[in-house]
Amino acid sequence: MTQQQELSYQALIDALEPVAREAGAKIMEIYGTDAQADFKGDGSPVTLADKAAEAVILAALKRIAPDVTVISEENAASHALAAPAQFFLVDPLDGTKEFLKRDGKGSFTVNIALIEHGVPVMGVVFAPALDRMFSGGKGIGAFESRDGTRRAMQVRAVPASGRVAVASASHRDAQTDAWLAGQGITDTVSIGSSLKFCLVAAGEADVYPRFGPTMEWDTGAGDAVLRAAGGRLCLPDDSAFDYGKPDYRNGAFVAWGAAG
């Protein structure tokens, strides 16, 4: 593969799902120990699991697509790169705070996305503790693989009882509560990591509002899956949400399932 080359998104998903599983296995080896976190300059935690999973993913991407730039959470040097027309976004362990809780909910994920011209066109999200693999690509739809079966998935029609929202387990804030109240949404599910995007994509929820800080590697893969399932990600004023922003830093956004 060469920079800006037209890629087969399905072939890329087929190649990267086993990579995400391998990274997830590394995470689960450490999940069962008493490993502690270090803290980066921004105060966010990083563990041996983040680093072990990233090593697996970066090695695989170098083999699979050696000419495509990779922007990865744990590779700080990559954050200074200007976004090219085509690049991968990697978060080897999204939901590190949930990982550290060891509360049995398993709401942490491995995330690999391909961005083209500011748009996520392919994404793989794996929740290793739950054995839930989500993937999707532009023009090919979205899928979940679980318990040895693979099914197509899409956002659901808004239930007669009203929308169900998913919200951050560790970063819920007053702005989110105010937005939900303004939308008349009272039914919420609290969960960590990019699983929030995936639950909307799978038709298990309807909207995910986020007003706290995130980075593009937090959202890219889940956003790709959501878009492939018929949903969309936008700014709170309904304008477009793009990738390749300065420092790869996101502002507030809303991830929607079906309209109406």
Image (tube, helix red, strand yellow):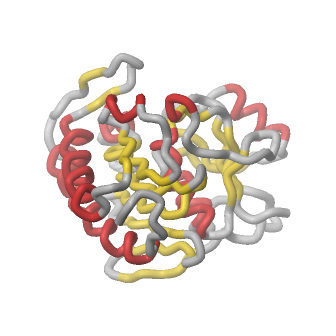
Q: Which of the 4 image quadrants contains residue 23?
A: bottom left
How many dots with numbers?
0
Percent position of residue 154, x then y: 62, 73
Q: Nearer the viewer, residue 62 or 40?
A: 62
User: Which residue: 41% across, 52% down?
Assistant: 88
Determine whether 173 is above or below 10 in the image. above
x and y percentages locating residue 222 in the rendered image: 52, 55
Residue 66 pos. (x, y %): 28, 57
Above-or-below relation of 192 to 228: above
Quadrant of the image for the N terminus? bottom left
Instruction: Give the answer, above or below, for where 76 lies relative to 154.
Output: above
Report whether 118 appears left or right of 71: right
Give the residue at x 59% y 32%.
172
Left or right: where does residue 236 sit relative to residue 90? right
Query: Can residue 40 be seen in the rendering of this structure?
Result: yes
Q: Is residue 28 visible?
A: no
Residue 70 falls left or right of residue 142: left
Residue under the point 46% across and 72% down: 9
Residue at 39% x, 66% y is 133
Residue 54 percent coordinates (x, y): 25, 46
| In the foreground, 68 or 248 | 68
Rendered image quadrant of residue 120: bottom right
